[in-house]
Image (tube, rainbow, N blue to C red):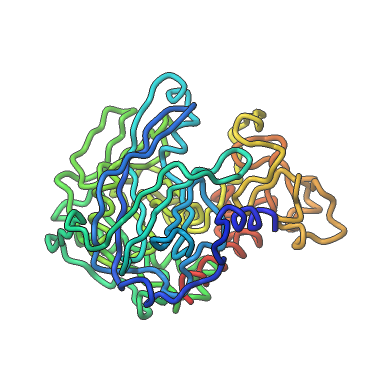
Amino acid sequence: MKKYLLFIILISNTVFAQINFDDYFLNKTLRFDYTRAGNSDTSYVFFEQLKEEPFWGGSKINLIDKFNFGDYMLIVYDSTGQNLLYSRGYSSLFKEWIDTEEATETSRSYYESVVMPFPKEKIIVKIQNRDRKNIFHTVFEYKIDPKSYFIVKETYDKYSTEKIYYSGNYNKKLDIAILPDGYTKEEIGKLKTDANRFIKAFFEVSPFKENKDKVNFWLVNAESEESGTDIPGTGVWKKTILNTHFYTFNSERYLTTRDVKKIRDLASYVPYDQIYILVNTKKYGGGGIYNYYNLCSSDNELSTKVFTHEFGHAFAALADEYTYGFDNAEELYDLSVEPWQANISTLVDFESKWKNMVDKKTPIPTPDTEEFKDKVGAFEGAGYVTKKVFRPTHDCKMKSNNTNEFCPVCYKTVLEMLNFYSE
């Protein structure tokens, strides 16, 4: 497909193939922390620190990204710059912020972090940004000597951890670290009860319920000073360990945190591929950013549905399929190319999307009528806009809480990602 060919071109003379883990890496993590700063016109990356973490939770087989998802790409080469050792797409809260009105008026900085297996020898790390034409450009490059005494080697034992659901070797499973926010010392028992409730709900959704043997859940029992979370719009401020808050970018239900350094420190207690922050509140909301983090409120009546919806974002890079009633597709998307998310399309290269899953009798675009309610097609209205961007089905977990199932396109993407992490 065109988007994969583009990525191969960008890595020039390297071979697009998985490497032998033990030839290049140790079974622990190297964390690369940096600050991304700028505004709607430009951005810069500034190095912060390198940190050694005790576990490598990822696959030892699938080290090279094959999906080409995300607004950014982490690429790791050997010291010659010729051999590609590791790559991973991801997104961040900064990327969402630069699309806000505030970013047109001022500049801000966001702390970010990426992880990779701990190298045996010197490496070159590159951070790439995707432009509106879906082309990646290197914006930062850094040479790393794994023997440097400046690599932080702090270890933590303040909080206990649990294998709350364990199916086997963490290098061969999808490992999800559940981190709490707004649970006091007296509420740690509630945390475990809540976590088990969400895990139960997680395994009621396909394809997770058919693949329980490919997933581990880990719990870090970290308490907060106060119960709950920040709700700026109503003047509620709480002292919590991960500093989560609603009203992100003035969206009441958008629950996030900018305290990425603390998140990584807590997650390092256990092996992990995905970070899920469980926030102790009844208020409806959540958030999910691809290979960055997931968040969900614990006690809303819709929380278990939100849990897997947000996981669709952060794990499989799925786009929201609902709209905000806006017709300004051109402001969010370059309509001459396909969005990089697997479940939305501009139809300019529909063959590279899910056209092969559409029945030949189904018209494209697809009328949103009763006749096609249960069909895969191309339904207008997705990715927050009402026109010119299309979704695969009438409804889906990524569109509304009216269904608890992923549509066939989203299901396929989630399953492929699940297999990628568990081989």
Farthest residue, direction right:
361
Relative to 226, is 175 on the left or the right?
right
Q: Residue at x 52, y 50 (%)?
A: 70
Image quadrant for the N terminus?
bottom right
Residue 383 placement (x, y as % from top left): 60, 41
Can I make out residue 392 in this image?
yes
Residue 277 placement (x, y as % from top left): 33, 53
Q: Is residue 161 or residue 1 the one in the foreground?
A: 1
Relative to 2, is 225 on the left or the right?
left
What is the number of callouts on the image? 0
Q: Is residue 400 or residue 102 the one in the foreground?
A: 102
Relative height, residue 387 to residue 145 (above, below): above
Relative height, residue 215 to residue 340 (above, below): below
Q: Residue at x 67, y 35 (%)?
A: 386
**Would you identify the image quadrant in which residue 167 lies?**
bottom left
Residue 393 placement (x, y as % from top left): 69, 53
Q: Residue at x 24, y 61 (%)?
A: 52
Relative height, residue 229 to residue 121 (above, below): above
Relative to 365, is 188 on the left or the right?
left
**Would you identify the image quadrant in which residue 412 lies?**
bottom right
Can I make out residue 310 in this image?
no
Farthest residue, direction front:
80
